[in-house]
Amino acid sequence: MQARVSRQPDPEIFEGKTYSLRPVTAVSDGYYETIGRLTDALLQSLPNEQALFARIRELGRRKRALRRLLSDTADSPDALLLRTLDEALSPFTASVQSHLRTLRGFDRWNRTLTMSEEQYHLAMLEIELVNRIYTGQFRSCSKKYAFLPHCLRDLSADCRSAQRDIDYVCKGCSENCNVNHASKTLRLHGVKPYIWMTANLSALFRRLKKEGNSLGVLGIACIPELVRGMRMCLKYDVPVVGIPLDANRCARWWGEFHWNTVNAAKLESLLKD
């Protein structure tokens, strides 16, 4: 029996502080269709996924140059790439510019909070490519862990999650909790789910590798946090896959938590052999 990943989303507009993968629909399927078609089209002009991956990683480091490249009339390859991403993905990042204008004080130096719209588009493509490159390796690992954000929980319930060997574990106390639904799905596919609260992932990776385990990680987070976590996993040669939250709606962005979702079909597609 297949576990349900998230309860039926509200049909209203699902607002994120900087992005929303379901800006005008009840589910985020349209985003995944868009990023999939876009990636397929980009790979027509490059030799392989790794080449495109290396190219966008390099571009993402050049934050100050991205806006200039986007308006480059010389049609350089990088400018064409950025314009292609902007045309396809800007409907999902409509709030980035207004968010950046509201930042004050030390927030203006925070790399997560200050990601530009161009960096969001590159990160979206990067996440898609990492999933394509590493899904097979992830599935074949002897130990597979998932780290879920606590902002997926049922905000109307008294969360009873408890700390276990690595981090907090969902106890299934609410049927309306998206952490609960995701955890059930992950367990069905042999992945241990944890709510990421206290775990030191770099220390965990080093320990498990010393024990001779092949370790794979699945992450769910907002786009800035997910892409950063995926990069850390790859730094330690840990096969990683990930799914962005449908919007960034936690207290870090809003000052309070708002109910959140993750795409059920995308999670299943990463887990199935």
Image: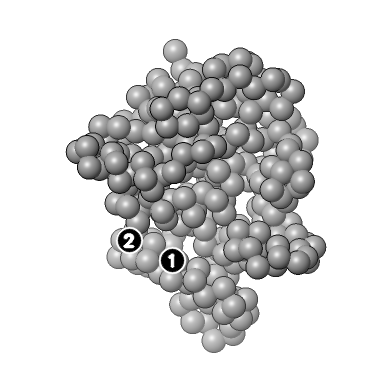
Across and down, in percent, residue 138 comes to: 32, 40
Q: What's the amino acid at mark 1?
A: Arg
**Cα–Cα span, label 2 and label 1:** 10 Å
- Looking at the image, is 150 positioned above or below residue 20? above
Across and down, in percent, residue 31 comes to: 58, 46
- Labels 2 & 1 near each other (Cβ < 8 A): no
Residue drawn at x 54%, y 17% is 171
Rendered image: mark on residue 57: 1
Across and down, in percent, residue 36 comes to: 47, 49
Apparent side of residue 123 relative to residue 55 in the rendered image (left or right): right
Q: In terms of depth relative to the viewer, which is nearer, 162 or 15? A: 162
Question: Which mark is nearer the camera, 2 or 1?
Answer: 1
Apparent side of residue 149 relative to residue 268 in the rendered image (left or right): right
Q: Which residue is mark 2?
A: 50
- Looking at the image, is 224 positioned above or below residue 174? below
Residue drawn at x 57%, y 22% is 161
Apparent side of residue 46 relative to residue 75 in the rendered image (left or right): left
User: Coloured how?
Assistant: one colour
Q: SS class of the residue under badge 1? A: helix
Given the current orientation, which residue lies at the most extreme top position?
A: 1
Pointer 1 local density, CA inside 10 Å: few below 14, some 14–19, many at least 20: some
The quarter of the rendered structure image containing the N terminus is top left
Q: Specify which label sits upstream in the sequence, 2 or 1.
A: 2
Q: What's the amino acid at mark 2?
A: Gln
